[in-house]
Image: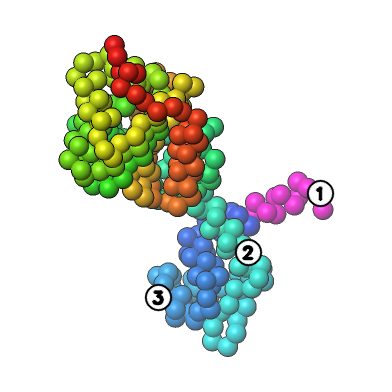
Amino acid sequence: MDRSTDMDSVLEEVEFLARSENRVEVLTALADSRRTRRDLEAETDASQATLGRILGDFQERSWVRKDGSEYVATATGTLVARGLTDLLEILETECELRGLVRYLPTHAMDFDLRHLADATITTPTQTRPNAPVRRLLDLVETADEVRAFSHAFNEQNLTVIERRVTAGELSFSGVLSRNAIEALADDPELNDRLRSLLAAEDTEIHVREEGIPLAVTIADDTVHMLLRDETGVLRASIDTDDEAVRSWATDTFDHYWRTATSLADDDLQV
């Protein structure tokens, strides 16, 4: 059998499963643990007639075997179920990220994008054009510790962090690009606010000359990313408490921290 025929056969099996949500549910359920037909009927809402056809098809493919009154996934059936679950998770994540992928700094994100499957995605709307920043502020308002590395530091975020740090409610460590520092220093009001933050006891800020291609905040255990297009327009934010993403964000923060220098009051002279 040539390769094209092999692929045709594989695609036929994929189509066989994809055509029926009940088939997917039954196979994944049996891969989890053995079940009777009554168990499967209760879990899937499929009729006994439908279950009979599905289980017969699965037995023909040696994906399932009967053991007394129960059905059990075989080793190959479990393999198919696990692969199918992975594919469904990938496609679900892709659907969520499809409109944002052009704005994701994937070159700097060395984790599997499946770890964003349960992320909260916030996009601007006509009534809430600043919704992604508002989401960030909500996280910062309730955090005990905030670490950030970014090419920008917007006024609202600076205001909230400065207020909470000076009140003794928050500790803050940040790595900002030189451009971000210069933008704040050029505005008298923001300059004063940044000086106040820098003077606070639980603050340390580093400045990085090489630039930072990301805008990431770690608020306690949650990682938040602001996503902008090539012109700087805010398109969305993503936040998650996934452990792998948090590990990536922490390691990246540590890298930028080590390769930056402490921000001094003299750096804010206009």
Looking at the rendered structure, the kind of residue marked 1 is: Asp
- Residue at x 21%, y 16% (from the top left corner): 188
Q: Of 146 and 39, which appears nearest the observer?
A: 146
Looking at the rendered structure, the kind of residue marked 2 is: Leu
| Tag 3 near tag 2, CB within 8 Å | no
- Residue to which mark 3 is pinned: 42
Looking at the picture, how far across and down is residue 8, in whole percent? Answer: 70, 50
Looking at the picture, how far across and down is residue 187, in whole percent? Answer: 24, 15
Q: Which residues are magenta?
A: 1-12
Q: Quadrant of residue 268?
A: top left
- In the picture, the disc for residue 79 is 2
**C-alpha span from label 2 to label 1:** 24 Å
Q: Which element carries disc 1, helix, strand or loop?
A: loop
Residue lying at the far top of the rendered structure: 270
**Local crowd at mark 2 within 10 Å, few (<14), some, or many (≥20)?**
some
Instruction: First in sequence, mark 3 or 1: give its number.
Output: 1
The answer to whether one can see residue 104 in this image is: no
**C-alpha span from label 3 to label 2:** 24 Å
- Residue to which mark 1 is pinned: 2
